Image (cartoon, coloured by chain):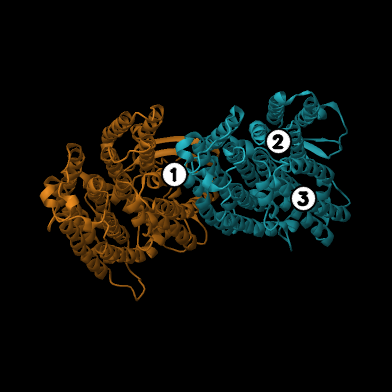
Amino acid sequence: MKTFDATQVAALAPLAIIIIAGLAVLLLEAFAGSKNRRFLMGFSVVACLIAFGVQYTAFVDLPVHATSSIFSGSLSTDRFSGIFGMLFLANAALVCLLAPDFLKEHGFEFGEFYALVLFGTAGMMIMASATDFLTVFIGIETMSLAVYVLTGSWRKNAKSSEGAMKYFLVGSFATAVLLYGMALVYGATQATNLAEIARAVAHNSNSPILIIGMLLILVAIFFKIAAVPFHMWAPDAYEGAPSPVTAFMAAGVKAAGFATLLRVFGTAFNNSDLAFGASGWAQIIAIVAALTMTVGNLAALRQENIKRMLAYSSVSHAGYLLIGVVAMATPELADHARGAIVFYLVTYTFSIVGAFGVVSWISSKNDERLQLDGWAGLGSRHPAAALAMTIFMLSFAGIPPTGGFFGKFYLFRAVLEKTDLTWLVVVAVINSMVATYYYLRVVTAMYFREVGREPRPIVSAPMTAAIAIACLVTLGLGLLPGWLLTAAQNAPIGR
Amino acid sequence: MLLILTTFLPLAGALLLLMIPKEEVGLLKGTAFTISTLTFIVSLFLLGLEPTGFSHVVDVPWVEPLGMRFHLGIDGISLWLILLTTFLMPIVIASSWFSIDKKVREFVIALLVLETGMLGTFAALDLFFFYIFWEVMLIPMYLLIGIWGGERRLYASIKFVLYTMVGSLLMIVAILYLYVQNHALTQVWTFDYDTLRQVVLPHGPQLLCFLAFALAFCIKVPLFPFHTWLPDAHVEAPTAGSVILASVMLKFGGYGLLRFAFPMFPWAAGVVAPYLSILAVIGILYGSLVAFAQTDMKKLIAYSSVAHLGFVVLGISMWTQKSIDGAVYQMLAHGITTGGLFLCVGILYVRRHTRRIDEYGGLAGVMPKFLGAFLILTMASIGLPLLSGFIGEFLILLGSFGAYATWVDLPIFFPHPKLLVGMATIGVILAAVYMLFLFQKLMFGPNDNPKNKSLLDLTPREIAYLVPVILMAFWLGCYPTTFLSGIDPAVSQTMAQFKTKWGQSNEEVSTARLMASGPQDPDAADRNVKTIEIAPGVMAPAPTQAE
């Protein structure tokens, strides 16, 4: 294990940039008057872009399977953490663009918002590169605390506080479960480092303490990605949080949860006994995946509130993604499955940020328009926004030519390479049909119904830009998915 | 190149229309009409076909790591369906010149995007592209029904989408399954139709894959009992939507069965085909009887489509040269006549804003020109000799009647194939019953509804777009050689491929394998000009168990 030196600090540069930018925002906030808050937004976006650029160069320079281990093996930068880092940074930049005019419209503008987004992003980046249980824990907590505060930041809104409270309590409970699991695994293997655990597991994989610990960790991650039956917090938290924050949560927290799931179960517990033995994680995840898709979609069918509908839909998307994690347990499928998950997460991130972007855009003061009725006739009043929302909905439903179609397609292909998981794909396909119905309800409301109350959307250049970018990426990935597929395939967990 | 131009000209036109301000209604319609006419003219140049294999082939890589290729090509079957599409599109735009007054720009854009989707689906030789185009068709049609449709448009549009999605999603699973099996055998990722056709699956998976494909196509046809979306969609769609739906989109069912489901999974097709033919005959009789009971003109014609397309499925499932020729011919003829009938209903609807049959009567006196056009199309739909409907139905019945050799080892309860054909023939008579019933109710009797006293006869614009349709109905009825000379070789080639593969997949195998005569090394195989020798003029014999 290498010790600390200068080249390793360079590997941390994107993370460092984000944390320093976050601190700088806190500092600048004290001097910025209410008029200059927009400057903080610009500052944060630029910081994200710089970090993105640095992360990109590092990603390209790094050989495919290489890894550089920092802080005595507790963090490692490899292509896997690189691609997730870029995803989180893009997500953060888009959320920063969405936020300022939404906060202003609803009268709770505050500069720390951007600092919290940046800190949350830093937490996610730590999660993606953590190779030790302690850093996993630090990453999850850094991210979660920022998101709890962001969820509750709309203080005048009772739902915001309620959502934050529920999210915080459930999240703390999940953290406790996580720590308990880590402690048990430590007891069984005398290690917190993922690579060392993997070595210990190779010698002795059927200790009950180890299995219980592993399952507790799995449960905690299920909480974070909102998999059934640990999804109860998601609709309330998603509904209560200010819409730009919901975008941040729905995309970032889920992607970070999957990054941790892939790394922990792809290295430490990547053992065929643990995966397929008695109470093996692959079987458990398979069942949870089927449940998550089905329950999420069925619940979404009946929602009239668009944020709750998107929340349940994001639950179901976690289910689709979990199919990929099941496939990852089989060594031959691992590379394709991981690539497919990363691809799916990228398309999902841009679509969900875009969708919540439109949800933020349409909400005016004292009239948030969360009920689907409020969207009636949007197609004739604001055709561009309605078109963008349609594209996001089609992407969720997996209809070409959108990125979401390729996400599903690529995932199913990876899973079908071994035929014993065909049943899961069939469940997923049936679910996609069900899901089409509620996604099209939004399209139906926008285009096929007459205008009810005249929409008075927020006029905001940054918000429009964010939605436009999300829309272009979603469409672009539907037309030319090849380059991202290649990049995602070539972003393995370093060895 | 010509094929790319034909396929994407409408899409390019749609992009062009985006630049035109939405107030310029006349300009929008004019441009759309010009583009669709241009597309038709360009598509006429597709007529020269190679004697075997696919013509006008375009094959460029698209997503390299997944082996998706932009692979288009046509043979005698798809050529005529493409020409049907491009022929009808200007007519459809002309027919909605005054009847569509809201969101005109979106309307014409949706029509042109739909055209590209339909043309691409007929031309695609890469299964993945086929699927993409198949889905691309869905959204414009959904919008056409949902935005410009009638009162129950929300219900009808969602029902249309969900029915189609059910079929197509299971189809993509089957496509993926084949794709992965092919990779396991050849180490090459490809969706190429000719390559995937070489994979012989064991009987169990083959049956499942066939059912997945066939379900998608049977919903589209629509085969009884998957037809319930059709009356709703037809009734609620605007005239343009109904015409396209009936004339072109239903043809994807028959086309898909003939191009993909049967040749790719011959053993399973042989097992399922008898059941398909029973459903087809039930559809013919049921559709005819239900059509007779309708009070809504569009619903009547919609159920008549169920019956007419039952003949198509019957012809395909009997799998003889004549019956398939007839099925393809019937698809063309149905496209022309039913499209024309929907145009006529649209003409009445514009004048009276009702589709109820009992609102009309005695129109012969006030609309003599309309009477003439409607009479010809009605007769064509019934299948009067010298008009389009006759040739197709006759060929199907003739071919099916001699199809007994195709079917052996049937379950004991199974009706004799000749009995099925006999029952289908009753459908021809029933068609005369309900169509003449409609004609009589509309045209004859006293004109006692005051609103009908002063109905305007056909305007020059309406005559201009009905005349080509009527001429085509005569052409299809009088000189079938024009069309059959292209269809017949393509059908015999499809049958020969089916037979080769059928012979090899008849034995039960435990794992998937490639066809023996197929290319072991896909790179060495020339995908596009794989020919199976058939002496000219000799019909491929029907496959039998003995072979």
Dot placed on the residue nearer the N-terminal end, 3 or 1: 3
| SS at mark 2 in the image | loop
Tag 2: residue type? Phe
Q: Position of residue A85 (x, y in %)?
A: 71, 35
Which residue is label 3 attached to? A171
| Viewer can see residue B456 | yes
Q: Which chain is tinted cyan? A: A
Dot placed on the residue nearer the N-terminal end, 3 or 2: 2
Q: Position of residue B305 (x, y in %)?
A: 28, 56
Tag 1: residue type? Glu
Dot placed on the residue nearer the N-terminal end, 2 or 1: 2
* Residues indicated by labels 3 and 2 sit on the same polypeptide chain: yes
Which residue is label 2 attached to? A108
Tag 3: residue type? Gly
Q: Which chain is tinted orange? A: B
Residue A450 — which label?
Answer: 1
